[in-house]
Image (cartoon, helix red, strand yellow):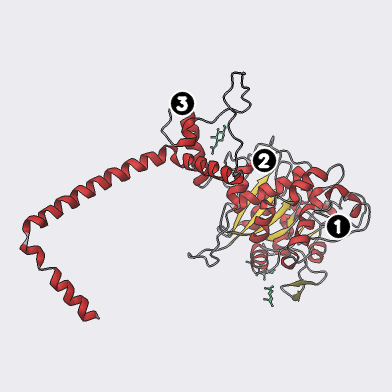
Amino acid sequence: MKKNTVERSQISTPKLPNSPIQFNDIVFYFLLFGFGLGIGITLSFFYLKDGSMDFQLNQLKVFRASVAHPQPPPPPPPTTLPVVVTQPTPPVAAQHGTPSSPTKKMRRKRRNNVKEVFEPPGSKHNMTDRMLFWRASFVPRIREIPVKRIPKVAFMFLTRGKVLLAPLWEKFFRGHEGLYSIYVHSDPSFVETMPKSSVFHDRWIPSKIARWGEMNMVQAERRLLANALLDVSNDRFVLLSESCIPLFNFSTIYDYLINSNKSFVESYDLPSPVGRGRYNTAMAPLINLEQWRKGSQWFQIDRFLAVEIIIDRTYFPVFWRHCKNECYGDEHYIPTLVDMKFPDRNAYKTLTYVDWSKGGPHPNKFRRDEVTEEFLKNLRSSTQCYYNERIVDVCYLFARKFSPNTLEKLLRLAPIVMHF
Ligand SMILES: *[C@@H]1O[C@H](CO)[C@@H](O)[C@H](O)[C@H]1NC(C)=O
Ligand SMILES: *[C@@H]1O[C@H](CO)[C@@H](O)[C@H](O)[C@H]1NC(C)=O
Ligand SMILES: *[C@@H]1O[C@H](CO)[C@@H](O)[C@H](O)[C@H]1NC(C)=O
């Protein structure tokens, strides 16, 4: 077989030297073809840059719309009566693809949209939630990563304004660049003033009003997740409050989170006014009373759950509509969603310690004199917990609530107790 093909090519090649005119023609046509191809590519490049992507998207929309409504209403019969046009008709070009003459402003806007959709955003972007969540929802279908990549942990701070214990966190992160990313969501009126040398510099994400107890707080959590998901290196996502502290050094926390095969979302059924009592029957039948869960809003989750939380368009709208007036969606939405849809992926506990022993609607806020070596050691290992189906001495990686006046003491005790 191999011999045969060699012979054949030997037979066909000798033709060329015997016909020099034909050979020249071939060279000429080849050059002509190359020239034409060059012009074609250049032209199509400019056309593409000029917003034809947008046009293609529009076409896609038109196509999808026609699929969704296979039988559009027939056009109104010609009539002499005045016709009231309720919706502006799209420009003809958008429907038929003939070059239009939009104003310069429109063209610029279109180009910007294309850029916004297809180019990676900077830390300060102007994306709407709709755009942001859509972009963050991209998930690779091939699981093996083709490049060497070091996974990162995303530390997401949900604050009113400043990160109150920032100096402690600076100390915690120092020397671990490349293994973490930081995102802060605070009140939109807050203006960040962190120095360039700070790990928090330029880490504030575009925010909206988020009030404790209201669903816009959950939306802020989802906004943090969506921003963090845009960085494909982020593998674990930790939600922290402004009064949280780390109980271990960075290496210990990083290893614990990256190597865990579960997510950490507290989720339990509480038959009391502050548990089942917050359930609204209007959520049935999608969510029934027996499925209603409660838990701490401070979670530590993997990429899979993070994506599921931002793409949820089934449960979130129901919560948005019916979880109001002392419903405290931030304590129920994620715990209920995770328990209903992804129980196998959850460790059913949070890694953030909090002290409810003093009673009342708010947990204990530790004062300066409460923060001692003994106290911090206790938080690190006073009980035993499961980790990857083994029993370990570590139950909590973080703790709250610490007031700003504990900072000095914490900075002094960090090297002694927490090893950083
Ligand atoms: C976002 O919008 C503001 C105000 O319109 C503008 O100053 C800023 O440059 C925009 N940022 C980006 C990244 O487009
Ligand atoms: C981090 O803390 C662990 C104990 O949790 C300790 O074994 C380790 O040496 C510490 N690492 C550094 C760099 O100090
Ligand atoms: C989680 O990790 C533990 C220990 O490495 C292993 O025994 C267990 O099978 C893992 N579970 C899952 C669901 O992967």
Which one is in front, 358 or 294?
Answer: 294
Is residue 308 visible in the rendered image? The answer is yes
Q: Are marks 1 and 3 in contact (CB under 8 Å)?
A: no
**Location of mark 2 (residue):** 207
Which one is in front, 390 or 342?
Answer: 342
Task: Categorize mark 2 by other alpha carbons within 10 Å: few (<14), some (14-19), many (20+).
Answer: some
Q: Are marks 3 and 2 in contact (CB under 8 Å)?
A: no
Which residue lies at the image location 71% right of the left edge and 55% below the top edge?
A: 411
**Location of mark 3 (residue):** 103
Give SS at disc 2.
loop
Residue 213 position, x and y percent, is 82, 45
Q: Name the amino acid type tagged 1.
A: Asp
Q: Name the amino acid type tagged 3.
A: Thr
Give SS at disc 3.
loop
- Image quarter of residue 259: bottom right
**Location of mark 1 (residue):** 355
Which residue lies at the image location 77% right of the left edge and 64% below the top edge?
A: 396
Q: Is mark 3 within 8 Å of ligand 1?
A: no
Is residue 402 visible in the rendered image? The answer is no
